[in-house]
Amino acid sequence: MKGASLTLSEAAAADIVEQADWYREQSGPALAKRWERAVTSALLRILHHPRTGALCAFANPGLKDVRRLLITGFPRHLVFYRVSG
């Protein structure tokens, strides 16, 4: 997608790194690498197909346009994001 960009908040980037570190400590480098590849794949999916994630149904009207996408292979992890532009 020409001209598309993806911006991660500092908190999101820190969460991704922290989770990779946790997987590395708990299960070794193979799982940490698998996590990193899965997150990268999810972010690329969002970049190329921004509306791929499901709209969330939050009660707060300020969150009406937030979407979520499951990180494949890690069913307890989701990416929450907004599409702008």
Image (spheres, grey):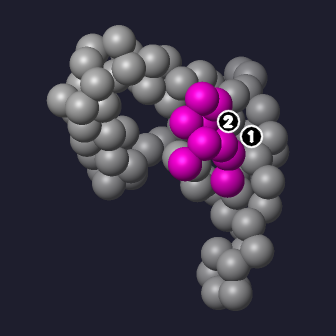
Query: How dense is the environment of label 2, judged by Cα within 10 Å: few (below 14), some, or many (20 and up)?
Result: many
Helix, strand or loop for disc 1: helix
Q: Residue furthest left?
A: 25
Horizontal side of residue 39 vs 54, given as left or right: left
- In the rendered structure, find residue 76 and report the number of the disc placed on it: none
Residue beneath disc 2: 46
* Residue 65 % position (x, y): 73, 67
Q: Residue furthest top?
A: 30
Query: How dense is the environment of label 1, judged by Cα within 10 Å: few (below 14), some, or many (20 and up)?
Result: some
Q: Splitting the image into 4 quarters, where does residue 49 fall?
A: top right
Magenta region, residue range: 68-76
Residue type at tag 1: Pro
Horizontal side of residue 27 vs 6, given as left or right: left
> Total number of numbered labels?
2
* Residue 33 % position (x, y): 37, 16
Residue beneath disc 1: 50
* Residue at 48% across, 42% down: 7
Horizontal side of residue 52 vs 60, given as left or right: right
Can residue 11 be seen here? The reply is yes
Helix, strand or loop for disc 2: helix
Q: Main secondary structure of the magenta part?
A: strand
Question: Contact, CB < 8 Å: mark 1 with mark 2?
Answer: yes
* Residue 78 versus residue 1 in the image, above or below: below
